Image (cartoon, rainbow, N blue to C red):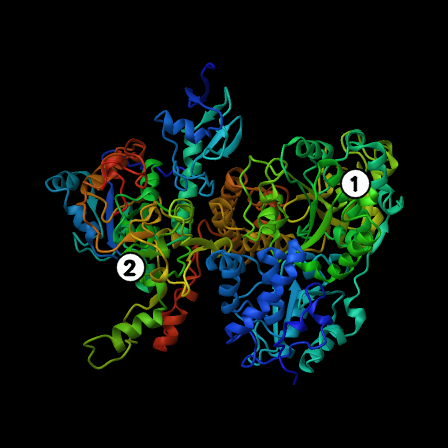
Amino acid sequence: MQEPPDSIQQISLTAPPWTDDNESIATQETHPGYALQMHQAESFINELLARADARPASGSLLQYLCLIQRQYSCIPETTVHVLAERLSIPASQVFSVIDFYTFLHRTPRGDFDILFSNNITDRMLGSQALFGRLCQILHVEPGVPRADGRVTVDWTSCTGLCDQGPGMLVNGIAVSSLDEKRINEIAEQVENKTPLKQWPADWFEIKDNIQRRDILLSDQIVNGSAIEALINKGAENLLQAIEQSGLRGRGGAGFPTAKKWRFCRDTKADDYYVVCNADEGEPGTFKDRVLLNSYADNLFEGMTVCAGIIGAKKGYLYLRGEYLYLREALEETLQQRRQSGLLGNNILGQEGFDFDIDIHLGAGAYICGEESALLESLEGKRGIPRKRPPYPVNQGLFGKPTVINNVETFINAAKIAVFGADWLRAAGTEQSAGTKLLSISGDCERPGIYEYPFGTSVSQILADCGAADTQAVQVAGAAGTTLTADAFERSICFEDLATGGSFMVFNQQRELLAMVKNFSDFFRHESCGFCTPCRVGGALINDLVNKVMVGHATQLDLEEMKNIGSLMQQASHCGLGATAPNAVLQTLEKFPDIYTARLANRSFEPAFDIDAALAPSRKITRRDDPGAHIAYEPEQSSKP
Amino acid sequence: MKPPVLTIESGKKPRLATAALCGCFGCHMSLLDIDERILKLVDMVEFDRTPLTDIKTVGECEIGLIEGGVANTENVEVLRDFRRHCKILVAVGACAVNGGVPAMRNQFDVQDCLEEVYLNGIGVVDPQIPDDPEIPLLLDKVHPIHEVVHIDYFLPGCPPSADTLWTFLNELIEGKEISFPYSLIHYD
Amino acid sequence: MSATVTFLLDGKAIPFQDGDTVMDAALRAGEYIPHLCHNPEFTPHGSCRVCIVEVNGRHYSACTLPAAENMNVDNSSEAIMAKRRSLLQMLFVEGNHICPACEKSGACQLQAVAYYTRMLSPHFPHFFPRRSIDATHPDIIFYHNRCILCGLCERASRDVDGKNVFTISGRGMNSRVIFNSDSGKLGDSELSISDRAASICPVGAILPKSKGYQVPIGQRLYDTRPISLVGDSNIRRNDKT
């Protein structure tokens, strides 16, 4: 057995752990996370801090914690205290961050930490059976490290592999296209302690899967040409071009991009920031995965153009933790751009045009896709959405004016800089210029990335991706819109169906309630917990969905779901809580049968399973007489 | 959903039943605290099953008052029996409303509770956990009664004051919408 | 001097200054908007949502909503009160609020706001979470059962006491207050009984030791008069020593 790493030389700040030569394979007893000596923690953190001096993004608390987690498969308490002291922050703040992000743990995970993607599309591809099988052959309880510390098998929120699912993460690295054969082989690798880097390379291959290209994916620009356009035309002219193009944010909300940039530019400050939101967490969305893989230069070009316009010296790419495997290539692209004079000081020879980009990794929190929660996360805090005003364009990252845009938005901006406003205007509709990338998954023959001009109808899209006998389409993810067949003539655009790009197809054979339950579970798990309606309401509505699933709900419970959902929409602090009940409320309205078919034939049902609540007492007293049970009661009087 | 209004055939007195589940009987004591008004109450209602009459089975009633939470099999059975027989069922007092003090045992496993009381407690003689089928079995948690049957009205308080109970019964029997002044709403 | 600008709160004109929230202006004018996580001493939080109001068909938390001229704010319709009741009921079932056994009863803002909205039951099923008590501090006790995650202790300790004793940790329903000390115990923290954070809790989560049940029932803060007239239990009172 290999020795656990005791030297910081063995870890690399940018490279994923599976490229390390001395991969840690340790048992629970010898696990470095246990009984970590103070001096070890100190030297490890000293090294991290020394490296961070040169890399500001990695100076964020969250980045340190990600590295410690990867090194020790948990955040040993010793490291928390050392880190808190070095960063001059309370240890409780460090703990609060660990407890917030699902990829960070206080106690060790297995040496192989295997997380199955829990999106409904993964489930439709059979992930539950594969999960059960892997647990069975590895003899592990879900979520509990095996006694020898070798492996943990658990679920995680959508990993963005819906077009080639079921997907999983092994020590943070994505594995796609799971089937029984691959599960058996993975189990074998785990039992053999095969270091991850020696696993078959094709398991880690993630295909772009671009099925339809339009202007954004087809019209290529030369690296640096957008920055040159900025230098030649000047910031104001270029901003006007973006304004004229009608570009709107591609994250789903559709705020006019030029307006955002101008607000930021017009705010007086000594520092400005550009932030790219690549925390693509909306279930069923994976288009940023493809853009980051194949269009990273365009993205960085767009961010640099934005920096030139607003006067930012510093940019951040907030990369969702699930896309860790993309990081190395992204760092290389950044390095090449520095070498080509497209990043760094005096970009393209322009005196004083200084801008650089750092990559900041997320750690498993959907809420960090909300722009102000993302800023909090970048600042090393829990991802709690800020109150507005102030808006990020006025007081964003570290209190400075900040532009935050989606990956796709920046790429559009770069191309508008080169091709002009009309290039975008030529496609799309009056209020929605250009195209939209859709991430299509679920019941269709050709899942993948589809680029469409805004205004394309759902029925057209369904025909193109080979969807037949479609019962429902979920547009814009778990927080989005559930469409019935009579709404398939509606179109993708800000005037009608605004979306960040998630497009999940459900055929007539699907039990739609499974989708509702999956989304409701998701929101309960992902609520940041800040405000009452989302934190508690989300849990209450989730319990009621489960009550429906097991056939114990009544009409009263459906009314209750509507009331709670409506309160969540009206009273929540941010968009997560306000949209979390959407799937429940919309299916209650559009697909009432999926609920009524499962209702108990009674007017009232208890809130809990009474007979099951007697089980512990039965066990203790070893009673099983009729009096030790509560029968399911026949219909009570006419109440209510 | 609006709570139901009591309708009574003219010339008939509404029948009233009461029961205590997992509680301390304090709510019943509070009912007795209406003092001389109890004579008026006797004029207003016909008592059915209640500890005050010692009638053991509940008949068809207009009003059922339940004190206490649901902690064991007997509580469930009595509560269901009341629900079947009472047109209007009322949760009376903190324990019925939210589990109250008995629900503080929900912080512990039922096994730990039983072991502490019957095996490891101070002064325990002949330690054994009772297992006689005559003894109602404990639920793993104490629940408020609205989690087990549908409840029409809630009277919070530990106990609800005599005035609260009196106001409620009067307004209910008069067919009014129940409304309490500030001073009659309290949770302790 | 510019002319006084006002907005309407339940039809009544409320003057406000630049930078005021609806809550700021209303409180200054002596108008009550129910609230729990808000305290005028601290920057608004906007987490409990109990101060929900309706303006032009949209809902906001009054404590974070900037006042604007001619805004028409609904603060007391039955529809708004019903929403507040539901939010309070959510808080009641989320924790373990056994009022008869709580030293804060009678002077508790959660209770008082619930009385004000005429909440008669918690309505929802209870979660009955298992939460601990930290009694390690010589003068102060912390009941996690009663915490409503208002964040006031966090703000008070950080912004007034300069100590950062309290931090809200975790996520979703697993959110909880943790303490900044080597052991994680309150007793090992820098908290002192004279700290603002020690007296800021609107509920019975943070309490001084050896002082329970001192005020007889009937004479407690909210026994006879509603919070709308009495005011918050956690504001600084000059007559208090």
Q: Residue C178 in the image: x percent, y percent? A: 42, 57
What quarter of the picture does the N terminus of chain A occupy?
bottom right
Crowding at label 2, few (<14), some or many (≥20) Cα neighbours within 10 Å? Answer: many
Of residues B99 and A320, the one nearer the viewer is A320
Q: How crowded is mark 1: few (under 14 residues within 10 Å), some or many (20 or more)?
A: few
The quadrant of the picture occupied by the C terminus of chain A is top left
- Asked whether residue A462 appears in the rendered view, the answer is no
Query: Vertical placement of A252 versus A107: above or below?
Result: above
x and y percentages locating residue A323 in the rendered image: 71, 59
Q: Residue at x 75, y 73 (%)?
A: A197
What residue is shown at x 80% (from left), y 36% (from top)?
Answer: A455
- Which of discs 1 and 2 lies nearer the camera? The answer is 1
Q: Where is residue A368 in the image (x, y as percent from the top left)?
A: 61, 50
Q: Answer yes or no: are tags 1 and 2 on the same subunit.
A: no
**Where is residue A41, by image quadrant?**
bottom right
In the rendered structure, find residue A351 and report the number of the disc placed on it: 1
Q: Observer-nearest residue: A459 or A195?
A: A195
Examine the rendered structure and indicate whether residue C122 appears above or below residue C190.
above
Circle 2 is placed at which residue position? B102
Going by the numbered disc 2, the residue's amino acid type is Pro
A271 above or below A209? above
Going by the numbered disc 1, the residue's amino acid type is: Glu
Q: Pinpoint the chain carrying mark 2.
A: B
Where residue B73 appears, x then y in whole percent?
A: 33, 64
